Amino acid sequence: MTEQIIILDFGSQYTQVIARRIRECQVFSQILRFDTSAAKLAAFQPSGLILSGGPASVYGKGAPHCDPAIWNLGIPILGICYGMQLMAHQLGGRVEKGDKREYGHAEVEVTGDSLLFSGMEPQQRVWMSHGDKLTKTPEGFLSVARSGNSPYAAIANASRKLFGLQFHPEVHHTPHGKQIISNFVHGVCGCGRNWTMKSFIDHAIEEIRTMVGKDRVILGLSGGVDSSVAAALIHEAIGEQLACVFVNNGLLRKAEAEGVRQVFGKNLHIKLHYEDATGAFLRRLRGVTDPERKRKIIGRTFVEVFQKATKKAGAARFLAQGTTYPDVIESVSIAGNPSAMIKSHHNVGGLPRNMKFELLEPLRALFKDEVREVGTQLGLPREVVWRQPFPGPGLAVRILGAVTPQRLQILREADWVVIDEMKKADLYYKVWQTFAVLLPVKTVGVMGDERTYDNVVAIRAVESVDGMTADWVRLPYDLLARLSTRIINEVKGVNRVCLDISSKPPSTIEWE
């Protein structure tokens, strides 16, 4: 069984980042609900367990608590922020409301000998985000680090391999946090460095062949990174047993349909069935402005069109999707889970109960950068593997307000200019995502000595590793000037261009 670290999610905005940091240590990680039973956890045979932070107070009414039996599993456990407070609370320590909330950078002094801080300097700059504080450690625990606001910035029970951190080692604001996590994963839990994309590919191919046998697989190909890599991986495993269906929903970028048909049908020789359903999608989206309604309509319509298209592709037992781990995490909406749903994804949980397929999602455990690495190792062309992420609902969620053929044309042309200029500046493959958004407002302008009252386009450019967090890109002024000039001059119906300078969190990358 693959070595793994399990993370119990108590609602922290950084839970996904913890998972990423562990994988950067070349160890597999997965996130489970906070109330997962000790028995179920034991069945996974994890090398270690991490309790995430969270917004609640451990003594608050309805606060999320873990199964107390986890403390007796005999595996290393690290509690982070709320996770540390919960550990102390359940094991007999005391947690109280702090005199003041500690948020932001703090200086921590390592005061004890602990594997967590092995090889590190005694003075550490860290990121705090808490209101409560530990005032008494449980029996058997020692303080191994302190801050100006707390004598218990880190605690440890070395004999039981139980550790707690009041700060967040997973975020970039804690400069040496990656080493702390590595010390826990490798030094405390004893994990090797076996989680590589080559090992994933070998295991996935074997798993796909075992699961599929001699049956056939249908895959909904969008042309994006995720579905493209899924198609290549499955094709590597079962060859001609795979057939891809490409549905043109009329919400694609300029020349996208032609590009997909060229790369997969002619170049990679994967069975590809093309279905143009532009009319059906646009009819159902007519007058719809709510983002979630758009997504659900597009999801339902895709499934209907796809089901009809599969009859042309031939009978199959399995439906394959390019679902990735961020899709799964962001779509969590189980009652009682402290992680709020951010948005729905039409390829997660969107299958009707009467659908006559079994689901195959070979990338479900991967983050985006891992998916790209798999694609590279499988030999997919650079323009496919390093293509910037594109939402499943397409341009519909980049048009704020109603989706119409005219507004689609405006956005499609503006988006083409953005991509073209980013490539000319040699930035397209270096930036996580750059795109245009059509706003639901019009403004006054002057063109050719005449008054105009036209649309506003916003440019969104973000830097990210996996899409879970992102910061806006400081594009060169001369590039911004060219983007604005070309969009206003070349895209009929636009007279103003704006720049989005918000990060995720608190904003999301897409506007809808």
Image (cartoon, rainbow, N blue to C red):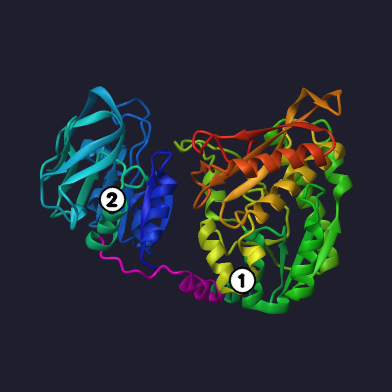
Q: Give the numbered dot on residue 204.
A: none
Residue 205 is a magenta residue: yes
Q: Along the line of sight, which residue is nearer the eye, 399 or 424?
A: 424
State whether residue 398 appears in this view. no
Name the residue located 73 percent from the left edge and 45 percent from the top edge: 415
Name the residue located 62 percent from the left edge and 77 percent from the top edge: 237
Quarter occupied by the N terminus: bottom left
Q: Is mark 1 in CB contact (under 8 Å) with mark 2?
A: no
Estimate the x, y position of residue 165 in percent, counting from the top left: 24, 43
Q: Along the line of sight, which residue is nearer the eye, 89 or 263?
A: 263
Q: Quadrant of residue 262?
A: bottom right
Q: Please name the residue that numbered disc 2 is placed on.
A: 176
- Specify start and end residues of the magenta stretch as a single range: 189-206
Estimate the x, y position of residue 243 in percent, counting from the top left: 75, 70
Q: Give the Cα distance between marks 1 and 2.
A: 36 Å
Estimate the x, y position of residue 223 in percent, counting from the top left: 71, 60
Asked if residue 184 is positioned above or below residue 36 in the image, the reply reads below
